[in-house]
Amino acid sequence: MRLAVTFAGYGGETMSASQNSDVRTLLVKIFGKDRPGITAGLFDTLAAYSVDVVDIEQVVSRGRLVLCALVTAPTVAGADEGELRATVHSWADSLKLQAEIISGTGDNRPRGIGRSHVTVLGHPLTAEATAAITARITSLGGNIDRMFRLAKYPVTAVEFAVSGAETEALRTALATESAEVGVDVAVVSAGLHRRAQRLVVMDVDSTLIQDEVIELFAAHAGCEDEVAKITAAAMRGELDFEQSLHARVALLEGLDASVVDKVRSEVRMTPGARTLIRTLKRLGFQVGVVSGGFTQVTDDLMERLGLDFASANTLEIVDGKLTGRVTGEIVDRAGKARLLRRFAAEAGVPLAQTVAIGDGANDLDMLNAAGLGVAFNAKPVVREAAHTAVNVPFLDTVLYLLGITREEVEAADGADAEH
Ligand SMILES: [Mg+2]
């Protein structure tokens, strides 16, 4: 269970009167080997003193427990604090646990303003990287109020709940730091909106799938080299996307339409893609794809994966042959952002509650228009311009950026398998 409160700032002597009432309180900390019944035993012991619970938090790591209970001081006639301390210590001793009791006043110190979730993905997550990231948070005035692991597989993902620092400043500083120490860091502002993100739109080539669909067609047409040359020219900025699309599609003229089925069967999903989509759908998200590739492939993906939206360019087919032309509205860089807005409108989801994922320069407008833009194994120019970057080749790591744990994903899969 996750609580939105922290003991990190507890200490009666440092709290101001305006922040806290002057009710005397006791912080009861229990350490030791975890086993069933400890919480019930502690509160049963405390119940004899008629104290009220102000806050509870517990962490168990490798079978070792740290249980913190913040309670009001005893008010029962004749029962004093010293007696409560002695009773708790003797109960703890009987279970070979350690207890510490700290007197103070009022509740925990309120968390600082400016709250963010910082997700760190490591493959592996080194102590050095963790030191660098957390030191940077501190240098910006941030306090880490809570930390916990989101996943151990396929990456180690941890989340820090940070207060006292501007989200934007954290994002900028941690982007630089994370690139230096070789981990991925996502910073999102805390609040209900994070749980309300309801539409995810993905690029297809080199994002949802590992391939570039035009290259799969080119292999069948025997024009891979020519297509690769045009792609390279476009990447050097000599051609814009639309020019390069027309030039590459023209090379497919005369190709038999039966190749479409072959290309569909050759498409390789990115690891974690199915897990990502399945989990998002379970959570009630709508999921769409936008592609500078072709509807001949995206329509098939939409059906196979149960997607809600798909849009791409369409290869013209006449008399069973590709004509070397595309029909309809061109999906380019601006088109992808336009489609994100259109899907959001159709889904009834505000743009701020959308997530976009992509790898190319073509995706940048869409990534920046979304509430959260994720550069997925992207080129440096895209990585630097996006809100956040994932540089491990597993698409389901995006779930961790949304605060979803691996455990929750696996529990949902397990529950489904039983039915
Ligand atoms: Mg792409």
Image (cartoon, rainbow, N blue to C red):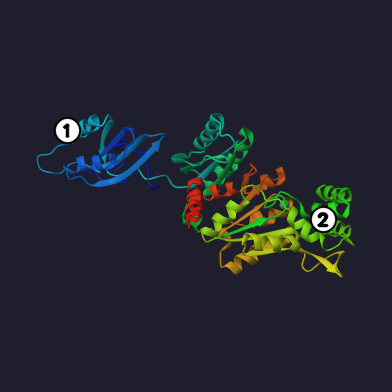
* Structural distance between the alpha carbons of marks 1 and 2: 80 Å
**Front in this rendered view, residue 286 or 116:** 286
Residue 217 numbered mark, or none: 2
**Front in this rendered view, residue 211 or 46:** 211
- Image quadrant assignment for residue 257: bottom right
In this view of the protein, can residue 331 be seen by the observer? Answer: no
Secondary structure category for the residue under label 1: helix
Q: State the image coordinates of residue 405 (x, y, percent, origin top left).
A: 49, 47
Callout 1: few (<14), some (14-19), or many (20+) C-alpha neighbours within 10 Å? Answer: few
Q: Earlier in the sequence, mark 1 or mark 2?
A: 1
Residue placed farthest to the front in the image?
A: 418
| Side (left or right) of 263 relative to 80 | right
Tell how many labels: 2
Callout 1 amino acid: Gly
Residue 82 numbered mark, or none: 1
| Side (left or right) of 234 relative to 407 | right
